[in-house]
Image (cartoon, rainbow, N blue to C red):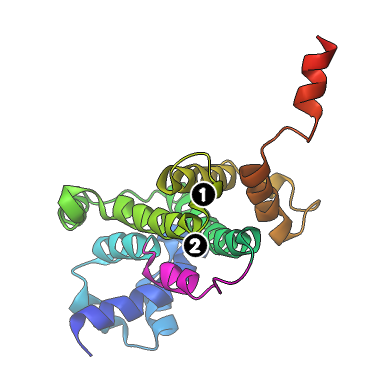
Amino acid sequence: MSMEDRQEAIAIAAIPLLAEHGTHVTTGQIAKAAGIAEGTIFRVFKDKQELLDFCVLRAFRTRELVERMTLIPVDQPMRKRLIEAMTMIDDMAARLGALMHTLGATGYRPDEANHAKDQESGEHGKPPMMDEFEQTTTAIAKMLSSGQEELRLPADRAAGYLMGLVFMTRMQAVRAARAEEKESDSFVSEIVDLFMNGAIANGAEQGGKDAR
């Protein structure tokens, strides 16, 4: 197994532990989860800090997410396709939120040297995390473009607004406050319905004008 593949395997095993324990997780726990000797970790990472920074970057990777989104049948109604895609994105946002909250609460700070190296690897000098977000937005825009004639604005802008609705709602923990009231898929359904139909009920706007 190459060093890159080994890093990948270790990160996949480590990320759930980081979401649970934050920086308090031990390399012994990570090694056990990865099915390797603890010393193997330090043959592919110079120290625990580099491992943590690598795991954070890996958690933001959207390649697998975008690939799953491309498998959504194109013959489904747009609303159903968007709900399925945005549910995948919300699930990822939930995992990222839990990971970053726990890491932050346990004192995680990225190493500036590792952070600078990660920024250099992004397209056109952009941080890789921004690249990942843009790739996901592009996938949603491609989905929306099949119904461009029904959109009020270009598909890429519409996709950006929809992504913002889901991510900001997730990060502000609105869903967590309503968890007992809503099934997990109804949260995304509500956002997609708002995106597609607006916040004004049919006839309400006209009724308001008539009243004046």
Which x, y percent locates residue 28?
38, 77
Which x, y percent locates residue 177?
71, 45
Sequence-first tag of 2 and 1? 2
The span shown in magenta is 61-76
Query: Dot 2: few (<14), some (14–19), or many (≥20) neighbours within 10 Å?
Result: some
Q: Residue 64: give its label.
A: none
Q: CA distance from mark 2 to mark 1?
A: 42 Å
Residue 182 seen in render: yes
Q: Quadrant of residue 88?
A: bottom right
Q: Residue 149: give its label.
A: 1
Q: Nearer the viewer, residue 82 or 165?
A: 82
Is 99 part of what is drawn in magenta? no
Q: Determine which residue is flagged by label 2.
A: 19
Give the residue at x 40% y 48%.
107
Q: Is residue 130 left or right of residue 18?
A: left
Which x, y percent locates residue 197?
67, 42
Q: Nearer the viewer, residue 73 or 16?
A: 73
Question: Disc 2 on helix, strand or loop?
Answer: helix
Give the residue at x 24% y 63%.
50
Mark 2 or 1: the one toward you: 1
Q: Nearer the viewer, residue 186 or 80?
A: 80
Question: Disc 1 on helix, strand or loop?
Answer: helix
Give the residue at x 62% y 60%.
83
User: Could you tell me which quadrant the N terminus lies in?
Assistant: bottom left
- Amino acid type assigned to the residue bearing label 1 in the image: Glu
Which x, y percent locates residue 59?
39, 63
Query: Dot 1: few (<14), some (14–19), or many (≥20) neighbours within 10 Å?
Result: few
Residue 113 seen in render: no
- Amino acid type assigned to the residue bearing label 2 in the image: Ala
